[in-house]
Image (cartoon, rainbow, N blue to C red):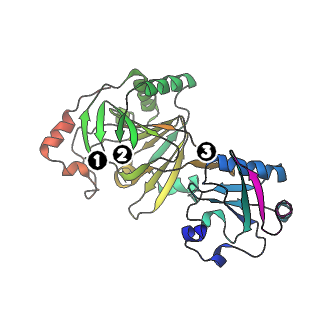
Amino acid sequence: SVLLKKESKEYGEVFSTVVTGNYICLHFGNGEEVDYNAMVKFLLLIFPKENFELNIFPGAPYGHLKLPSSQMNSLLEKSLNPEHHCAQLDFTQNKRWVFFLPTHLNVDSFSKSMNAILPETEIDKVVGDVKIHEKVLSSESQKKMLEYILSQDWTKVSMRRVQYYGNEYLESSKHVKPTKPIPPTVTELNSELKSKGTNPKECEFDVVSIIELSAGQGIPIDFEPHFFDGTICYFPLNCRISIDFEDESKKAYTKSLNENSAAFITGDTRLSYRIGVGERRFDKVQNKLEFRKCCYLMVLRKLRKDPCKCRFSALCAAKKTNKEEEKTIAASPETM
């Protein structure tokens, strides 16, 4: 009943009376890594070659299993209690019965599925002005930067821990004010990004935000204020992120960004799309789930020195500021 309520479907729409190769796995946890690992351990006893596809849904007590052949379906059925289609699995602290019930649905039909995202090749066609550079820093430089970040004080903003350097961007009021100088480790990264950016002059970043994102935590999508110039850059450390985009028709797209990689967002995409970071606990890589760790996301921007003259007048926050605010923004010190 919980599943049917969450999915807003009738029993017959979900469950099948015949084997389909797709199974709903019920009562095995809440979509956590320990639940997934216990399920994989059980399935590997039946299918040592790992040619199955298991998906879980964060916060939901059910998952989805896909088996590609009738032979594998038969092997699973033989491993279950024939009357109730279930098996007792060893979890971290206890044993639980898990039910494997045939379903009409594939994984992307579930409302809580986070795997039904646009392929990268398609994203590139519809979300322009986004350039990715992999492996920006050496392992040693990454380690030094992470050690520096973890040694500094944090400010709590919207349930997230944040550090600001150069200029502090106040998201709630859409204002900027000078703050502590950009440290050498960030200056080193800034130099690397400037050399890789689409327009080096637009990559002289002087507004640096470092945001701590635990697994499953994200940043709500919103428009980028137009008092920032040129390019915005996302640079995650310690774990990958998913950047969410929403166009003017409110159609959403997601692009994955590996750790130690930089995403340069420019042009109309930066000016007219809503941009944020998805709330994902795991990623699907070659039909396996990789669980996320805590990410330290650096968001780098550059203050605009002149009034914005873009064509998106309805979205342009820079044009709505009064003269005193424009003077404050223009007078913010160069910190690079």
Point out the residue furthest to the front here: 94
> What residue sits right under mark 2 in the picture?
158
Look at label 2 and name its amino acid.
Answer: Ser
On the image, the x and y values in percent for residue 239 come to: 55, 38
Front-most of residues 70 and 305? 70
Secondary structure of the residue carrying tag 1 is loop
Callout 3 crowding tier (Cα within 10 Å): few <14, some 14–19, many ≥20: some
- Residue 113 percent location from the top left of the image: 58, 60
At 58% from the left edge and 59% from the top edge, which residue is drawn? 60
Write the start and end of the magenta stretch as one range: 77-91
Q: Tell me which label, 1 or 2, sits earlier in the chain.
A: 2
Task: Give the spatial CA distance, label 2 vs label 3.
Answer: 24 Å
Q: Which mark is residue 291?
A: 3
Mark yes or no: residue 190 visible.
Answer: yes
**Residue 185 on the magenta span:** no
Q: Residue, x 38% and y 61% (percent of image)? A: 248
Between discs 2 and 3, the one toward the N terminus: 2
Under circle 3, the secondary element is strand
Please identify the quadrant where the C terminus is shown: top left
